[in-house]
């Protein structure tokens, strides 16, 4: 692997989501290093990575190099993988979305504070403050401008770019807290929720049992099943023997299938090497090319 990416909790760490998308959505291989936030392991990671304190942080293996701050990660990856498509080729689109990404990185303090990313909840009755509403309106002004000017469905045009990685957590906040959205923003939020990399991230958040109550608000809430996500393939946990599965090794790790990690996906029993691999696959099977390839190859 060329990179190690330090990440916090998938359900809550909005900046980690940006870092993940900057690699995964562009097909750049990396080793994710998940560190639960507010844990001793997180403090140890901060000590090891100093002066970096935050996630995401990207280690360039073999180069003794670490880059943190999501915008710096975006620029480093764009420089090292010039054909990956982090920024549009078109001069006007490149200038525009670079500015949007920089504004996202530097601004929206109110929107980033109380309505923090929380992929586990969709609240009823959230009342935004004036500052939160002003931030949400400015985001929608930027999105509407870019979608109109560069043609959508992504902010820089036809393909997902670094700027979309920067704004993806905002799309989730709009859903979690029920902000009023104009029509282009509503369409854009749906586009983000349908993106395969975002779907993989959300599936991992769903599969992680850790709840950080510090991010919960005292309001009635439903769960992520009510987010505007594509309808998943039929899938459930399967209880039985490893020999029930159509595969003997995990589609992700190639390690042997374990009896506590079986799933029925689109009518077939598939085995995984651990319960987390099973859970993330059951939530949204079609988001995982390795699972879909297994189903296709054994059809
Ligand atoms: N501006 C930074 C923000 C990163 C950030 O604040 N990450 C949070 C998690 S979402 C974090 O690591 N917090 C730990 C801390 O600040 O001690 C970026 O662009 O990456």
Image (cartoon, rainbow, N blue to C red):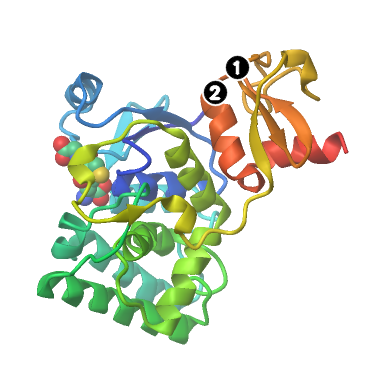
Provide the secondary structure element on which disc 2 rests. helix
Disc assigned to residue 104:
none
How far across and how far down the image is residue 144, in percent?
39, 82
| Distance from Cα at disc 1 to Cα at disc 2 | 7 Å
Measuring from the top left, give residue 75's x and y in whole percent: 36, 53
Q: Where is residue 50 in the image (x, y as percent from the top left)?
A: 17, 28
Residue 1 lies left or right of residue 260; in this view the side is left
Q: Residue at x 40, y 50 (%)?
A: 223
Closer to the camera, 68 or 78? 68
Mark identifier at residue 260? 1
- The answer to whether any part of residue 41 appears in the image is yes
In which quadrant will I find the C terminus?
top right
How many C-alpha atoms fall within 10 Å of the one at disc 2: few (<14), some, or many (≥20)?
some
Residue lying farthest to the front in this orientation: 220
- Asked if marks 1 and 2 touch (Cβ < 8 Å), the reply is yes
- For disc 1, the neighbor class at 10 Å (few under 14, some 14 to 19, many from 20) is some
Q: Which residue is drawn at 33% across and 66% down?
A: 174
Secondary structure of the residue carrying numbered label 1: loop
Query: Residue drawn 18% across and 35% down?
Result: 53
Whereabouts is ligand 1, in terms of quadrant? top left
Mark 2, residue position = 275
Q: In which quarter of the image is residue 213?
A: top left
């Amino acid at each position: 692997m060329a990179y190690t990416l330090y990440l916090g909790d998938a359900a809550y760490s909005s900046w980690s989501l940006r870092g993940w998308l900057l690699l995964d959505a562009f097909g750049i291989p990396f080793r994710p290093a998940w560190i639960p936030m507010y844990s001793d392991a997180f403090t140890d990671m901060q000590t090891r990575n100093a002066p970096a304190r935050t996630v995401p942080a990207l280690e360039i293996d073999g180069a003794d190099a670490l880059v943190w701050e999501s915008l710096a990660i975006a620029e480093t990856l764009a420089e090292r993988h010039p054909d990956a498509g982090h920024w549009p080729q078109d001069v006007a689109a490149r200038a525009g979305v670079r500015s949007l990404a920089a504004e996202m990185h530097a601004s929206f303090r109110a929107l980033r504070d109380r309505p923090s990313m929380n992929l586990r909840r969709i609240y009823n009755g959230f009342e935004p403050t004036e500052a939160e509403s002003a931030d949400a309106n400015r985001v929608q002004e930027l999105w509407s401008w870019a979608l109109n000017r560069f043609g959508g469905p992504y902010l820089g045009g036809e393909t997902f770019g670094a700027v979309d990685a920067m704004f993806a957590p905002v799309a989730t906040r709009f859903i979690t807290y029920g902000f009023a959205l104009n029509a282009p923003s509503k369409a854009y939020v749906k586009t983000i929720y349908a993106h395969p990399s975002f779907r993989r991230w959300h599936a991992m958040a769903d599969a992680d049992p850790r709840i950080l109550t510090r991010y919960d608000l005292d309001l009635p809430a439903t769960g992520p099943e009510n987010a505007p996500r594509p309808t998943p393939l039929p899938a459930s946990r399967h209880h039985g023997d490893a020999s029930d599965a159509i595969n003997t090794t995990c589609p992700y790790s190639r390690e042997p299938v374990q009896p506590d990690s079986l799933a029925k996906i689109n009518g077939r029993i598939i085995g995984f090497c651990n319960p987390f691999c099973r859970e993330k696959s059951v939530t949204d099977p079609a988001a995982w090319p390795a699972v879909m390839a297994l189903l296709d190859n054994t059809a």
